[in-house]
Image (cartoon, helix red, strand yellow):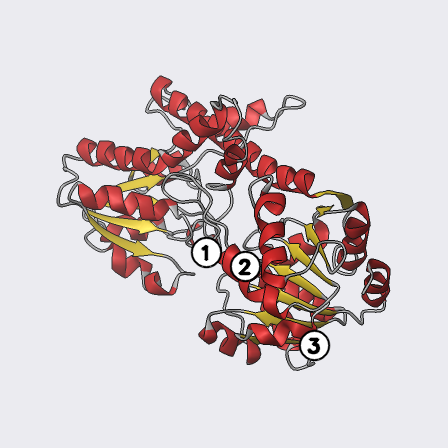
Amino acid sequence: MSLHDLQMKIERKEAKLAVIGLGYVGLPVACQFARVGFDVLGMEIRAERVGLINNGISPIEGKEPGLAELLNQVVPSGKFRATTAYQELSDRDVILLDVETPVDENNIPRYEALRAALGTLGPVMQQGALVIVESTIAPGTMQSLVLPLLEESTGKKLNQDFYLGNCPERVMPGKLLQNLRTVTRVVGGMTLETADTMVALYQHVVQAELDPTDCITAELVKTVENAYRDVQIAFANEVALICEAVGGDVWKVRDLVNKTPYRNMHLPGAGVGGHCIPKDPWLLAYSARMEDVALKLIPIARLINDGMPSHVAHLIQVALSKMGREMFGARVLILGYSYLENSDDTRNSPSESLVNYLTKIGAEVVIHDPYVPAYQGDLFGLAENCDAIVLMVRHQEYLNLDLNLIRSVLRTAVLVDGRGVFDTKEVEGSGLLYQGIGVGINSA
């Protein structure tokens, strides 16, 4: 099948689609294409997840506006179903890959899931299929890994027997469907004609601008945008540390800085988590590993942001000391275990790092999170006889806590705020000692 023929099938919504990986990216993507009328088959190796999806039940917890309802609409319609069997993908015209691409302890990309998907897809992929990698990958990966693996596993040639492109996802938990619809996409094809065909596909579900380009540009754009955010957060965190040292309030400083035109200081906080920002800067850096490029800013930003959970541990220790208690043997309640507010996504959770720090120095840790099943429960019951309560995630449920009730059940009246949620005077008015990220003891 030629690209022209495939594009005609796409425009008529006759092209059969497959989505490999039904996680935070793949599931909403599959549902959106099914919603507009495409026949979509989802490929997922976790059988229990497939069972839930085929019963119209979303496996994603947390606040995801519209996703559960959309899934419960497209499954009964017959437009979307999930499978664990790759051989069922043999009639698919377009295959989208949405698998995890983490880095290891040495910040080297781990492409096990991507390699496995490509290697298993290859033998069953039909002639003339278009393969699109939506996962975030290091610049150059399409040319150095994806293309050779597909040609090897299929025995086919690029642009003769199949087509290939990269359209990095731009979604985030809590806004999966909204971002998919309204955020611009960079559409990278191995040829411009492939990119144009991809645009024809995505315009069915993306209402924002679609920018056709080559694969290396698409790979660079995605990793650069997340590295940019990581660096900006690191700057905000360093300013927060300065404010603590000199007796300032980073939240007031940030508000006033951002009144100046062309200034947009990011939010400081207790750490950076999730699947993307902690690893995408390393993917960008990895792409220059063979060249004589002395990278400094990206590694330092990663070091600063990775150090924030340990800084929160320091703040807890300082606050307990003011109350005459030691960290060893203290009972500490952590509020929030996901990496993002109103989400169940715990990947690279700063709270996990904090728990590890506290445990190593002898504290007893209890955890509450309304969206993570393992940590749901009665918050005030968990707070009983605790020596400190630590806000790590800005969940909606924590924004209007009854501080007087919290104070009445704590053994030691300490509240540590890692996200700038609470008003200092209000906290202290309830009888709690306040210690917060970016707030020095002399701030007013």
**In the image, which is nearer the foreground, mark 2 or mark 1?**
2
Q: Could you say where residue 440 lies in the image, as x and y percent from the top left? A: 35, 24
Disc 2 and disc 1 in contact, CB within 8 angstroms: yes
Q: Nearer the viewer, residue 379 or 123?
A: 123
Residue tagged 1: 345
The secondary structure type at the circle numbered 1 is: loop
The residue at the point 57 percent across, 69 percent down is 43
Residue tagged 3: 79
The secondary structure type at the circle numbered 2 is: loop
Q: Could you say where residue 354 lies in the image, as x and y percent from the top left? A: 30, 43
Which labelled disc corresponds to residue 18? none
Residue tagged 2: 24
Q: Which amino acid lies under the numbered mark 2 shown in the image of this protein? A: Tyr
- Dot 1 or dot 3: first in sequence order is 3
Q: Which amino acid lies under the numbered mark 1 shown in the image of this protein? A: Asp
Question: Can you name the residue that lies furthest to the top here?
Answer: 246
Q: Could you say where residue 268 lies in the image, as x and y percent from the top left? A: 46, 33
In terms of image quadrants, where is residue 141?
A: top right
The residue at the point 54 percent across, 30 percent down is 288
Q: Which amino acid lies under the numbered mark 3 shown in the image of this protein? A: Lys
